[in-house]
């Protein structure tokens, strides 16, 4: 059993391979045959790719953008030779790997039946590569399907992917309220985070991976807006002092009640986004925190 998302991303991609089987099979062997949307496993039907017998043959699909890949489904030949795929490595990487060490090895292909078989993964990358290691090897594939979702959508609020914590919790003011996608600034609407009255209260967003953060937008509560005055936005990969020692993006001088202000962070690199009111006892209330940026190159 395997899970998929609706769209087969491989159909968007461009396929290449280390070699193409020569005459009389030239017209049946193209790398693109393995991403034609057809699971036909009879080689002579013209829907399978195959390499020459060679050292370390490989096949690769370039998805043309970075995705979180959740599953890969492979159909091998059904007329013969399916066992030739046994031991193939499946790689996910951000760049082509045939001339360098792979970033990620997803699985080793250990089965030889021709029915479509899935591998569940959850890794980010642009390239999916299958590679046979050894001399006098051949790689034949009748369909490769790749399912997942974009790593970062242009203009996407990365905070919605994350998890939030804070120094303490005022009743009903849980930290996740600040990343619920709702800018409602009235406390009674239940969409704001709220700490207790602490010294240097803080709120922290874990983006779950490292990004280049371009900007952070904060929506303030409609009442007592001055509580956020002097808050610092900190971004980085360290959890020292609960993340509050990371480099500073900006200082919040003032945000009007119910207003939203955007602070430019100019590609600061980090997994954690902290908002802390340093050096005094205060409540920290955040009605929405939005984070915009992009994946590391």
Image (cartoon, rainbow, N blue to C red):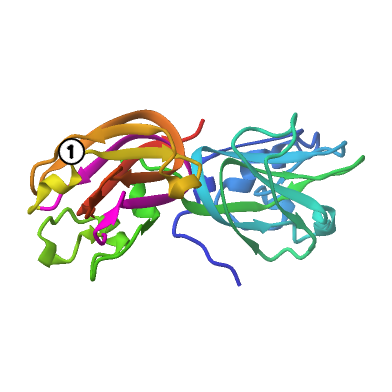
- Left or right for 129, reference 79: left
Question: Image height check: is 225 above or below 121?
Answer: above
What's the residue at 56%, 42% (across, down)?
125
Q: List x then y, in percent, for residue 262.
A: 22, 36
Residue sitting at x 13%, y 53%:
221
Q: Main secondary structure of the magenta part?
A: strand
Q: Is residue 150 visible?
A: no
Q: Mark yes or no: residue 10 visible.
A: yes
Q: Residue at x 47, y 60 (%)?
A: 5
Query: Looking at the image, which residue is at 22% across and 44% down?
Result: 218
- Furthest toward the right, the residue is 135
Q: Which residue is farthest top?
A: 266
Determine if the magenta segment contains residue 216: yes
Q: Is residue 267 left or right of residue 89?
A: left
Magenta range = 195-221
Nearest the eye: 31 or 69: 69
Q: Position of residue 283 (x, y in %)?
A: 22, 55
* Residue 121 is inside the magenta segment: no
- Quarter of the image with the N terminus is bottom right
**In this picture, residue 177 sits left or right of residue 247:** left
What number of labels is visible? 1
Compared across the picture, whether 158 is left or right of 28 comes to left
Point out residue 29 in the picture as x, y percentages from the top left corner. Answer: 72, 41
Which quadrant of the structure image shows residue 3?
bottom right
Residue 17 in picture, x, y percent from top left: 71, 36
Where residue 260 sits, quadrant-wise, is top left
User: Mark 1 = which residue?
Assistant: 261
Of residue 121 and residue 241, the one placed in the foreground of this image is 241
């Amino acid at each position: 059993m395997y899970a998929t998302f609706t769209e087969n991303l491989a159909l968007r991609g461009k396929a290449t391979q280390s070699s193409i089987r020569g005459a009389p099979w030239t017209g049946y062997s193209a790398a693109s045959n393995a991403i034609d949307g057809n699971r036909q496993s009879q080689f002579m039907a013209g829907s399978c790719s195959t390499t020459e017998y060679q050292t370390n043959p490989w096949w690769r699909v370039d998805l043309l953008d970075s995705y979180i890949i959740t599953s890969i489904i492979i159909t091998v030949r059904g007329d013969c030779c399916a066992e030739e795929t046994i031991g193939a490595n499946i790689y996910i990487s951000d760049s082509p790997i045939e001339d360098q060490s792979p970033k990620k090895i997803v699985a080793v292909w250990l089965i030889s039946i021709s029915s479509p078989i899935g591998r569940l993964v959850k890794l980010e990358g642009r390239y999916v590569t299958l590679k046979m290691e050894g001399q006098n090897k051949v790689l034949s594939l009748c369909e490769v399907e790749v399912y997942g979702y974009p790593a970062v959508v242009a203009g996407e609020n990365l905070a919605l992917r994350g998890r939030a914590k804070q120094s303490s919790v005022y009743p009903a003011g849980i930290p996740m309220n600040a990343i619920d996608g709702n800018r409602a600034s009235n406390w009674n609407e239940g969409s704001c985070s709220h700490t207790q009255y602490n010294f240097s209260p803080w709120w922290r967003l874990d983006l779950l991976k490292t990004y280049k953060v371009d900007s952070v937008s904060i929506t303030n509560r409609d009442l007592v807006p001055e509580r956020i005055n002097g808050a610092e936005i900190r971004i980085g990969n360290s959890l020292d002092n609960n993340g509050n020692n990371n480099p500073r993006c900006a200082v919040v001088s003032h945000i009007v009640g119910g207003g939203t202000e955007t602070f430019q962070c100019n590609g600061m690199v980090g997994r954690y986004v902290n908002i802390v009111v340093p050096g005094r006892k205060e409540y920290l209330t955040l009605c929405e925190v939005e984070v915009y940026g992009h994946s590391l190159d």
